[in-house]
Structure formats: structure tokens, C-alpha cells
Image (tube, rainbow, N blue to C red):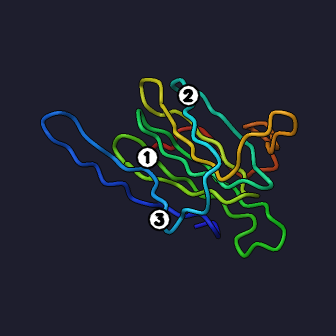
């Protein structure tokens, strides 16, 4: 696992009315501080990546559908520099993934319907100076292939 990345299993509490699932609490081990919360969607087969943040950490939960989250550590001085991690999350695997700043990340919707992802980053989005540094999803700088792995 890439240094600083953490996975928090999420508990789903169902009853006859529906279910409840806490995603983040201020007493969680991965909680640092609250910047904002937002939801984004990804259509089936679409890849959103790669990008990293220099300041903010992300806390990602897929609440509908399934995604394949790719992580790549290109941080100078990191014990896991050059490491790639792949994590599946969503309805069949309810987890929160904490992504530290400096780690490239992106995801692919692998469900047959649109995936809904909630992010609770540690910083507010700065419209004038966004903390987003992007490279193409198929960049040769990241040793990762988004294709399905059969077998």
C-alpha cells in the first residue's frame, strides 16, 4: 500500500426503511480537518485521472455503482515512490479511501450504470488557484493500465 493511503471499512446499517452508512467522523483515524464535501459522477467505462493535489488530502467514498481507483506515488523521498495501488470500491465494497496530497489518483467507473462518488477533502476548492495538477489518463509517466484484467 502506498505510504499515507488508508482504507476505512464502512458499516451499513439496514432496516425496513432503507439504510444508514456513516462515511466520515471527526473521531476517525483518517480525519484531519474539513474543507468541504461534494459529489461527482462518472459514466460507465469512463476514466477520470490522473491528478494530484499539493496541499489537500482527499477522502473518497463511492456511494452508488463501482469504481476502480488507481493510485500512483511519485513523491520525492517517499518510501513507496514508484508504487501503484488499485482499489475497488462502491456498493459491493463500502469503504472510504484516504488519499494523501502528492499521490496521483484517478478512477474508472466499472459498473453498468453511473457511479456517484463523494469526496470530503481537507481544503476548500480555490477557484482562482486550484490545487489540481493533471496529466492524461494514459500518460507514460504512470505505470498503470486502465483496461480490464481478465483471467
Seen in the picture, residue 10 relative to 48 is either above or below; the reply is below
Q: Nearer the viewer, residue 149 or 101?
A: 101
Residue in view at x 81 percent, y 33 percent: 127
Residue 106 position, x and y percent, is: 65, 43
Seen in the picture, residue 50 relative to 22 is either above or below; the reply is above
Mark 1: few, some, or many residues within 10 Å (few <14, many ≥20)? few
Q: Secondary structure at mark 3?
A: loop
Residue in view at x 65 percent, y 53 percent: 122
Q: Secondary structure at mark 2?
A: strand
Based on the displayed image, in which of its 4 quarters is residue 113 positioned?
Answer: top left
Which label sits in the foreground, 2 or 3?
3
Q: CA distance from mark 1 to mark 3?
A: 37 Å
Q: Identify the mark nearer the N-term, 2 or 3.
A: 3
Which label sits in the foreground, 1 or 3?
3
Residue in view at x 71 percent, y 44 percent: 124
Q: Is residue 90 left or right of residue 85?
A: left
Q: Contact, CB < 8 Å: mark 1 with mark 3?
A: no
Q: Secondary structure at mark 1?
A: loop
Q: Which residue is mark 1?
A: 151
Residue 55 position, x and y percent, is: 78, 56
Q: Which mark is residue 28?
A: 3
Q: Identify the mark nearer the N-term, 1 or 3.
A: 3
Mark 2: few, some, or many residues within 10 Å (few <14, many ≥20)? many
Q: Which residue is mark 2?
A: 42
Amino acid at each position: 500500500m502506498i505510504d499515507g493511503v488508508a482504507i476505512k471499512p464502512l458499516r451499513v446499517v439496514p432496516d425496513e426503511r432503507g439504510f444508514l452508512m456513516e462515511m466520515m467522523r471527526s473521531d476517525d483515524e483518517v480525519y484531519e480537518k474539513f474543507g468541504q464535501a461534494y459529489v461527482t459522477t462518472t459514466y460507465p467505462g469512463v476514466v477520470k485521472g490522473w491528478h494530484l493535489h499539493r496541499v489537500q488530502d482527499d477522502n473518497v467514498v463511492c456511494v452508488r455503482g463501482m469504481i476502480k481507483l488507481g493510485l500512483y506515488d511519485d513523491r520525492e523521498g517517499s518510501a513507496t515512490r514508484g508504487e501503484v495501488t488499485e482499489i475497488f470500491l462502491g456498493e459491493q465494497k463500502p469503504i472510504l479511501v484516504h488519499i494523501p496530497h502528492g499521490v496521483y489518483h484517478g478512477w474508472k467507473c466499472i459498473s453498468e450504470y453511473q457511479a456517484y462518488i463523494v469526496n470530503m477533502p481537507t481544503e476548500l476548492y480555490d477557484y482562482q488557484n486550484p490545487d489540481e495538477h493533471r496529466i492524461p489518463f494514459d500518460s507514460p509517466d504512470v505505470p498503470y493500465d486502465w483496461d480490464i484484467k481478465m483471467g
